[in-house]
Structure formats: structure tokens, C-alpha cells
Image (tube, rainbow, N blue to C red):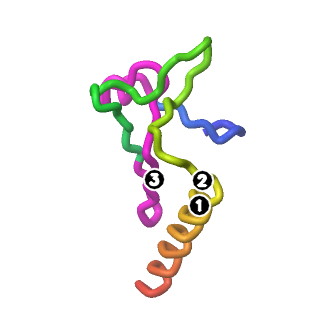
Amino acid sequence: MDKSGRLVLPKGVREKIGAVGPVLFHIELVLDRIELVPVRAKSGRSAIKRKDGLWVVPSTGKPFSATEAVAEDRQDRIDVISKNRTDR
């Protein structure tokens, strides 16, 4: 991981999962692991598209609230921490 928090997957791993070009990943925190699952468009190709020279994630047509996304992520992390404490 670099100082900006970016991860680089080795070429063999990218080829194995069919990651060609930029790929959007769904990230799952599982106890002390991070699971990265490629997000695919319905066509089976990457959900990221090139637009005016920039890589973008096309709109899904669903409303998005950054505030709600942050709150949901925070609650997920609290749930994981709470579960880890009760498992001791």
C-alpha cells in the first residue's frame, strides 16, 4: 500500500480475476481480513467507464447520500468491534 492508501494487485492476481484496466471493488472487513470482490456490470465487464479522459463509475440511477453511506459504514464497524468483544 502506498502513502495515499492505494493497493496494487500483482498482474497474476489481476489476470486470474479478469481485471483489465481500472476495476471497482466491493470491500468487506472480515475480522482481521479485507476481502475485495470485483464489482461487475450486468454485461460482465468492469463497472468503471472512461468519460472525457477520466475513469468514472456510471450513475446507477439510485439516489446516493454520502452522509448515509458514512453512517452505515460507521455502524458496520461498530457492529464488528462489538462482535469481537463479545467473542472473547
Q: Is residue 74 magenta?
A: no
Name the residue beneath numbered marker 2.
Answer: 65
Give the magenta-colored segment's residue range: 10-35
Question: As shown in the figure, which amino acid type bears the numbered disc 1?
Answer: Glu
Q: Residue at x 44, y 66 (%)?
A: 31
Name the residue beneath numbered marker 1.
Answer: 68
Mark 3 and mark 1 in contact? Answer it, CB < 8 Å. no
- Within 10 angstroms of label 3, few (less than 14), some, or many (20 or more) residues? few
Q: Position of residue 35 (x, y in %)?
A: 41, 50
Q: Residue at x 54, y 68 (%)?
A: 77
Please tell me whether residue 77 is drawn above or below residue 65 in the rendered image: below
Question: As shown in the figure, which amino acid type bears the numbered disc 3?
Answer: Ile
Q: Quadrant of residue 43?
A: top left
- Which circle marks residue 8 in the picture? none
Q: Position of residue 33 (x, y in %)?
A: 44, 57
Q: Nearer the viewer, mark 3 or mark 1?
A: 1
CA separation, marks 2 and 1?
Answer: 5 Å
Please tell me whether residue 46 is drawn above or below residue 35 in the rendered image: above
Mark 2 and mark 1 in contact? Answer it, CB < 8 Å. yes
Name the residue beneath numbered marker 3.
Answer: 34
- The quarter in which the N terminus is drawn is top right
CA separation, marks 3 and 1?
Answer: 22 Å
- The quarter in which the C terminus is drawn is bottom left
Question: As shown in the figure, which amino acid type bears the numbered disc 2?
Answer: Ser
- Within 10 angstroms of label 2, few (less than 14), some, or many (20 or more) residues? few
In the rendered structure, the answer to whether residue 47 lies left or right of residue 51 reads: left
Q: Residue at x 52, y 48 (%)?
A: 63
Q: Quadrant of residue 39?
A: top left
Q: Position of residue 56 (x, y in %)?
A: 55, 26
Instruction: Describe the element under mark 2 as helix, strand or loop.
Output: loop
Viewer-closest of 33 and 18: 18
